[in-house]
């Protein structure tokens, strides 16, 4: 399992970001039944940088908490069987499933933790679990999709024992 971890900007979260990210990604993918070793890139950044990315990639000119950039489109969320037919989903040297990129605003982690009345750890872990679900095809644009994703996020956070 490979986590490419990068942090930019002066703000720091009061937690072990790389260690926690690895744990949350592993737990989320185990929960989803992912049968492969994985590769994920995670960038922790500041509001201004994520605002630019949000504007450039989504046409929304404001900071957001997390952006997810999946490497593969999943015909059915969380179903991995179709991947066997496509070699371009796997790293040619490691054989790991290349899931995609996650970008998180550290400032949003801190402000949302305060706003929602829980720890920075809880907010950070939640955003990673949320993003990994996006990387494997889940979305929340429709009400039914949102309910499924919310249930999965809640169950993942319970597995991690990171509660509000």
Image (spheres, rainbow, N blue to C red):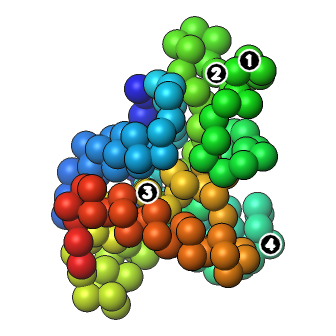
Q: Which mark is residue 59?
A: 4
Q: Is residue 78 above or below residue 87?
A: below
Between the C-alphas of marks 3 and 2, the distance is 21 Å
Say which label, 1 or 4, has the lower sequence index: 4
- Discs 1, 3 touching: Cβ within 8 Å: no
SS of the residue at dot 4?
loop
Q: Is residue 63 above or below residue 52?
A: below
SS of the residue at dot 3?
helix
- Discs 3, 2 touching: Cβ within 8 Å: no
Q: Is residue 56 above or below residue 41?
A: below
SS of the residue at dot 2?
loop
For disc 3, the marked residue is 128
Place of residue 61 in the rendered image (x, y in percent of width and height, measured from the top left): 71, 78
For disc 2, the marked residue is 90
- Discs 2, 1 touching: Cβ within 8 Å: yes
139, 33: nearer the viewer: 33
Between the C-alphas of marks 2 and 4, the distance is 30 Å
């Amino acid at each position: 399992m490979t986590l490419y971890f990068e942090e930019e900007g002066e703000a720091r979260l009061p937690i072990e970001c790389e260690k926690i990210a690895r744990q949350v990604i592993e737990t989320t993918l185990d929960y989803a039944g992912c049968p492969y070793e994985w590769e994920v890139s995670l960038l922790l950044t500041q509001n201004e940088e994520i605002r630019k990315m949000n504007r450039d990639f989504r046409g929304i000119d404001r900071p957001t908490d997390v952006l997810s950039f999946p490497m593969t489109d999943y015909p059915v969320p969380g179903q991995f069987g179709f991947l066997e037919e496509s070699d371009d989903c796997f790293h040619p040297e490691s054989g790991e499933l290349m899931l995609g990129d996650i970008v998180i605003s550290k400032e949003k982690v801190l402000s949302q933790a305060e706003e929602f009345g829980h720890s920075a750890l809880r907010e950070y872990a939640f955003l990673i679990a949320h993003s990994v679900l996006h990387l494997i095809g889940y979305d929340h644009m429709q009400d039914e999709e949102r309910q499924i994703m919310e249930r999965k996020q809640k169950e993942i956070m319970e597995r991690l024992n990171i509660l509000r």
